[in-house]
Amino acid sequence: MGLWMIEFHLDGRSGVSPYQQIVQQVRNALRLGLLREGDQLPTVKDVVAALAINPNTVLKAYRELEHEGLVQARPGRGTFVTRTLTDNTLAAHGPLRQDLRRWLTKARKAGLDDESIEALFLTTFRSAAQEDIA
Amino acid sequence: MNTVLQAHGLGKKYGRRWALTDCDLEVPAGHVVGLVGPNGAGKSTLLNLAVGMLTPSAGTVEVLGAPAGAQQAKVGYVAQDTPTYARLSIADHLRLGRRLNPAWDESLAQRRIQHLKLDPKQRAGKLSGGQRAQLALTLGLAKRPELLILDEPVAALDPLARREFLQDLMEAVAEQELSVLLSSHLVSDVERACDYLIVLVDSRVQVSGEIDTLLATHFRLTGPRRDQKDLPRDQHVVTASHTDRQSTYLIRTGQPILDPAWTVTQLTLEDLVLAYMGRDVQPERPVLEVQR
């Protein structure tokens, strides 16, 4: 796969399905700027041959990325990146991130340890999501 | 939809023992099917029935829309331990393949032998286990079958040879229009390579279906102790265990789980297979191994 911009790796112990791992790795590469508009994703055959995984797994991942508008399949040529994720992520969310940092400092001052902070965040996140549905 | 394998009430009896019973299957084309189960569960029996090397004692089995064994040219078979002719050279094996198979793809065979860096003059008996498996796979692929059946193809291989074998098999699936049915007693092989699963335990099919669908419809429920009969009717219990206060169920359901008392967890493929393997199907199970 040396000629491609990125290589995929599978973590068998992660509990994340192989197709989702591929989707996440492409998204990450887009966020980090490793993949840019116009870049070609590795062909299904090359991914399959490198990872010993089912071709349908790769196709499914690429279809999902296409559905999200991140890549486009060009018949007979391959799958190409159509959009980047670099601009609307970390840089754009700087203010939010600062708020979160301030909140974290407060939480620590209040005596919460890592696990409690995570638990507090998750329960709040979930109940907020519930309220949005209701 | 085209089916590669269709079985109705299929059964096979050796003497007085049923090696396979009440087998109903309908496997659509275009999949890599993993047939999983412990040793002696009846995996080889099912595969041998599918290739027509065994005749059913009960029921019917159709392969690619015709009775099993009727379309030898369209079905490739790599038997357990990837047998080859020890005294024949690799070139001899290819010559045999060419003579015996109407759709033989000589350039594919040559390309693979080159890619594997094998010497055509070498006798098959001198090959390593991994090389022998690759030779058997070469013969199976160059036959250009619509369905390739492999019985425990990687069981005897070391991790590297195992990976290389599965890489080549998956590459062939991506290149050719090929359905694959392979048996294994290791979930890890199946997890990467297969997208369709059949679990066979104690001569019976316990569950079969597309792996994505199976994973999306099986859940582990844990919560305060509750009787099985109090579960909603659409929740089929695969396994259940109880303490004085707590119940843990592994269920199959197509419906959302609404009861807030349960903590619901998704299963990994290994959890799912182990659940079906571990449940008590027939307590009076005979402990005979099927002839291999």
Image (cartoon, rainbow, N blue to C red):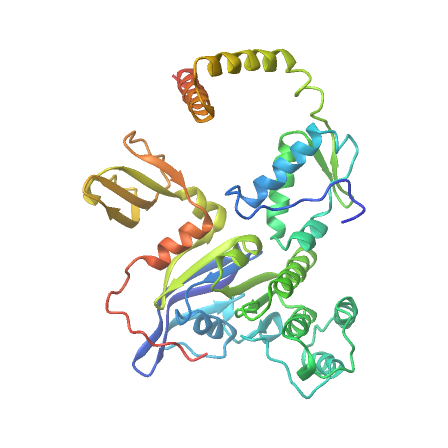
In this view, which residue lies farthest toward the bottom?
Answer: B87
Towards the viewer: B118 or B199: B118
Give the image quarter of residue B137. bottom right
Residue B122 drawn at (x, y percent): 75, 82
- Report the label total: 0
Towards the viewer: A54 or A77: A54
Query: Image quadrant for the C terminus of chain A?
Result: top left
Q: Left of A23 or right of it: where is B89?
A: right
Residue B46 drawn at (x, y percent): 44, 70
**Residue B177 makes an appearance in the image:** no
Q: Left of B273 or right of it: where is B125?
A: right
Towards the viewer: A94 or B268: A94
Give the image quarter of residue A8. top right
Q: Is residue A90 above or below residue A72?
A: above
Give the image quarter of residue B260. top left
Residue B76 drawn at (x, y percent): 60, 71
Residue B247 drawn at (x, y percent): 25, 42
Q: At x 36% / y 53%, what residue is drawn?
A: B275
Q: At x 50% / y 54%, what residue is drawn?
A: B196
**Residue A124 makes an appearance in the image:** yes
